[in-house]
Image (cartoon, helix red, strand yellow):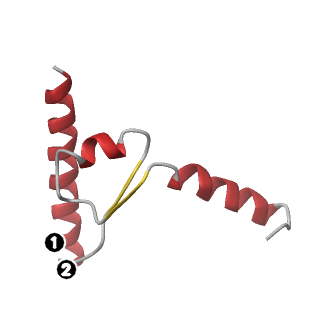
Amino acid sequence: MQSGIVIGAAAQAEGLVARIKRELDIPNAPVVGTGGLARTVSAATDLFTAVDPDLTPRGIREIWLHQQGQR
């Protein structure tokens, strides 16, 4: 069951990214896998150019620091 979930998540990402690339006409756009399971899903696909599980929390922190006048 776990492998089905991982393979399903990889297939969803592949389909979504393919549609976005086609719609934007950017076939070679880089794709960054983010989130806590990004490394696990990336093992089931060659879709990702990079994997950064902590990108979102770091980005939120940077926005907060900017709002506080610290950036």
**Left or right of 53, for residue 62:** right
* Of residues 21 and 50, the one drawn nearer to the viewer in this rendering: 50
Residue at 51 percent of width and 55 percent of height = 55
> How many angstroms separate mark 2 from mark 1 (CA)?
5 Å
Which quarter of the rendering shows the C terminus?
bottom right
In the rendered image of this protein, does residue 49 appear above or below residue 6? Answer: below
In the rendered image of this protein, does residue 27 appear above or below residue 56? Answer: below
Residue at 69 percent of width and 54 percent of height = 61
Residue 22 disc label: 1
* Of residues 10 and 40, the one drawn nearer to the viewer in this rendering: 40
Dot 2, how many residues are within 10 Å of its Cα: few (below 14), some (14-19), or many (20+)? few
Q: Are marks 2 and 1 in contact (CB under 8 Å)?
A: yes
**How far across and down, in percent of the image, does residue 36 sit?**
43, 39
In the rendered image of this protein, does residue 33 appear above or below residue 11? Answer: below
Residue 11 disc label: none
**How far across and down, in percent of the image, does residue 41 sit?**
26, 43
Residue at 27 percent of width and 75 percent of height = 29
**How far across and down, in percent of the image, does residue 52 sit?**
44, 55
Dot 1, how many residues are within 10 Å of its Cα: few (below 14), some (14-19), or many (20+)? few
**How far across and down, in percent of the image, does residue 62 sit?**
68, 61
Q: Residue furthest top?
A: 1
> Mark 2 — residue?
25
Amino acid type at image mark 2? Asp
Residue at 14 percent of width and 45 percent of height = 11
